[in-house]
Amino acid sequence: MHQIGKSTFQGSVILALSLLAFLSVAISPRYAEAQNRGEDYITGRSLSDFSGMGHIDSIDEDKMVIDDCSRELSSGVKYYKPGPKKISKSAFAVGSRVGYVEDRNGDIISLWLLPRAKTRK
């Protein structure tokens, strides 16, 4: 009888450790990504991942005006649409709705072309 209780306990411990190992593998990359929003951070899974959102007022070679605020583009800025799928800068135009991710200096490192917001009737 003592042997049965010991093996049930060992099975429970192994199951609990397996579950913890699985959860740490599933959760830790997402947590680490959120903690290290550096220059290599790429987003697009959720609107809350963006540093900001708005509509493009004007586009220059190295900066954009988004909702009346001038934003510098990093030299390696990457352009995306949700998916995430890389696209060219030419896909962006005045009036486009965008989300962006900034680096530590406030420069845009990735710009995301978003669908127009649905209007309520």
Image: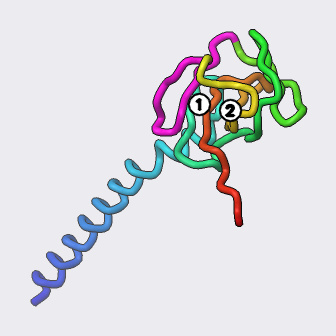
Identify residue for label 1.
41
User: Does residue 103 show up magenta in the picture?
Assistant: no
Element assignment for label 1: loop
- Residue 27 position within the rendered picture, expressed as x and y whole percent measured from the top left: 45, 51
First in residue order: circle 1 vs circle 2? 1
Separation of marks 1 and 2 at Cα, in angstroms = 8 Å
Residue 4's label in the rendered image is none
Q: Which quarter shows the C terminus?
A: bottom right
| Front position in the image: 30 or 8 | 30
Expressed as whole percent of the image width and height from the top left, the position of residue 78 reads 59, 20
Magenta part, dominant SS: strand
Nearer the camera: disc 1 or disc 2: 2
Task: Give the residue type at disc 1.
Answer: Tyr
Please report the bounds of the magenta region as a residue range.
75-89
**Discs 1, 2 touching: Cβ within 8 Å:** yes
Residue depicted at x 24% and y 65% = 14
Front residue of this view, candidates 8 and 28: 28
Q: Amino acid at mark 2?
A: Val
Query: At 50% across and 45% down in the image, what residue appears?
Result: 30
Q: Which residue is mark 2?
A: 101
Along the viewing direction, whichever of 107 and 35 lies nearer the viewer? 107
The image position of residue 16, as x and y in percent, is 31, 67
Please indicate, yes or no, whether residue 18 appears anywhere in the rendered image: yes
Residue 8, picture quadrant:
bottom left
Q: Above or below — where is 3 with respect to 52? A: below
Q: Which color mode does the image show?
A: rainbow
Residue at figure coordinates x 59%, y 30% from the top left: 41
In the rendered structure, the answer to whether residue 82 lies left or right of residue 13 reads right
